[in-house]
Image (cartoon, helix red, strand yellow):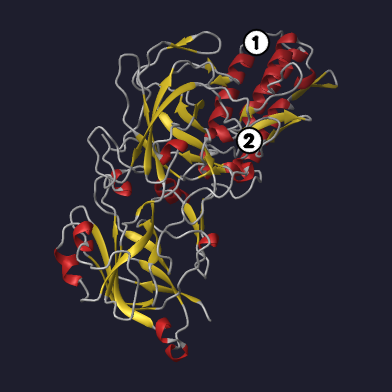
Amino acid sequence: MRKKRLRLILPLLVLTVLSGCTNDESLRTDEQPVRAQLAFAVAPLTKLHQDKAPLHRTAASVVQADEHFRGLQELHLIPFAKRGRVEISDQPKLFGVDYSAGSDYSKTNAHFFYYEGMQLMNGVASFLVYARAAGSSDASLANKQYYGALTANYPADGNPADISFSLQSIRDNNDVPSEAAAIARYLTAIAHAECLHEAHTYSWSAATDSKLQAFFLNFINQGQETTAPMAGSSVNVNAYVRELRSKIAALTYSDWTVERKLQQAIIDSIDNKAVGLPVNYPASIGLPDGAAVVRYTNGQFVPQTTTTLARVAGIRRYAHPADLYYYANSQIKTTTTDTRKTYYENEATWTDVLARYETDNGVVRNNTTSVAIKEPVHYAVGCLQMRLNPLTVSLSDADGRYITVDATTFPLTGIIVGSQRPVGFDFKPTSTSEVDVRYVYDCYPVAPDNSVIYLPPYGGTTSANSNTLLLQTPDDEEVTVIAEFQNNSNVTFRGLNGLVYPGTRFYLLGILAPEGGATYDYQRRVITQDYVTTLNVSVNSLRKAYNVVPDLLTERLEVGIQLTADWKMATPTIVELE
């Protein structure tokens, strides 16, 4: 039998369906398509008490937090003869489509979609339903950061085993970005500073003066045995080099000495070699500042873009958050009476509409006139809802220095979440391999009103919620969560792996374990589809602040924040969040 994909542009959305054999004369009577009306509903929008933020990404209008339904796009309806929940081994019951109209009979908090003139094959008893929340179809970086980005794979035959969804990587490969290469060349040029003195060339790297020698080893981040990774973002490098220049310029040497000439050569390299240096890398390509890492090796600075012994995360691992996606796996109700259209116009809830269909868990037959997909489509993704607790202690760094924190000292600028893997037709992970792990980077962790979230000072109040959409995580697996802050303190402090300069980003890491228990299924995992995981973050020290993002798969991570969590269902028809 010939199969093809049909894409029909309806008044409401694009409906993608599967077509079977269209030559009616070749079909047995029980294989003849049945013309009927087909309808489904969207679960009521999450409606929470005022002190709770609903499932959403950034602005309320994007995530329906203001209860204004965004609509649907890229709708996929896949029919099955299975009289029960569709499993991965089930095969679709292919059907053709002939429609005359599609109508949206949405009420205040109920959304019904009704299609006339659909042709459904005899024996259809259940459906898989997928849809993406309507929004911009723009593939730009800004759009993906705002709405999220999920790649969907729908095979032509509709086989559940071949349906998959995965987060879109911010970078498709680990190739060194041109901006990173430019920064590395600039740092190398400074390290190679040299001067001519009495017909001999003297290099900074071979300086005999103890002060210049110490500054060089510090510049290349030389430890006792080897050089360590360094923060390589534009902001970090500018801050680092600016401080170096200031300290080098403060040295005093006698005129016409080799030390005085080397001092000036270093300053000249800093001032004159920065032409064309990128000003906003790696934010310019969508990555967190802490993903930009350089290391001095074999006489030059080299960008670190892959997961190496340096224990930093490869840039290909970073992905956009998920966008708002819907899913249902449901049996149907049927009627042989009429089209039921008037009930979609008049009834207030989906329950009321379903009550007008006589046959529960029905099957399409020759005399079927209208079909309703019983279960409303619900959120296929989960939400991590983060809020920051006010400080209860004074914050000190790795040198024991105390940092004064006021209401705007440390804005939350990003959230990174590990343990994200591809999911299958049921939006559950299909792999436990570390190769498939992605780290979501949410660069817009704003409050529901789109305002900036700050770490509350001592005596302050708990911050508003940020919200990040994620795919379901594997059962019984811990998830690493990193809060990215910006240092607006005007003080340079020392964290776990180096200095954090004013205006630069730093990272505090926490590990979140599943709730545990056997009462509810969601207790087995950190992120579950259609659930909100509420995360309360307490910061008690800056000693373990990273200035680059570590490899989240290593077992030697240093925890710098305390996390407590609560899990709640997102769809209020099942449970209301308190």
Q: Nearer the viewer, residue 353 or 539?
A: 353
Q: Amino acid at mark 1?
A: Leu
At 52% from the left and 70% from the top, the residue drawn is 156
Give the amino acid type for the residue marked by disc 2 in the picture.
Ile
Q: Quadrant of the C terminus?
A: top left
Classify 468 as above or below 508: below
Q: Which residue is mark 2?
A: 183
Q: Residue 562 location, x and y as percent?
A: 45, 22
Instruction: Give how far across and how far down residue 237 sits, in percent.
Output: 58, 28
Where does the image place residue 469, in percent across and percent down from the top left? Answer: 41, 43
Q: Nearer the viewer, residue 134 or 111?
A: 111
Give the quadrant of residue 352. bottom left
Q: Are marks 2 and 1 in contact (CB under 8 Å)?
A: no
Residue 143 relative to residue 197: left or right: left
Q: Is residue 143 above or below residue 104?
A: above
- Is residue 295 visible in the rendered image? The answer is yes
- Above or below, 504 relative to 100: above
Between marks 2 and 1, how big is the CA–CA gap?
26 Å
* Residue 321: mark: none
Q: Residue at x 31, y 38 (%)?
A: 450
- Asked if residue 12 shows in the view, the reply is no
Residue 273: % across, % down? 65, 33
Say few, some or many: other residues with alpha carbon within 10 Å of mark 1 (under 14 / 14 to 19 / 20 or more): few
165 vs 578, nearest the viewer: 578
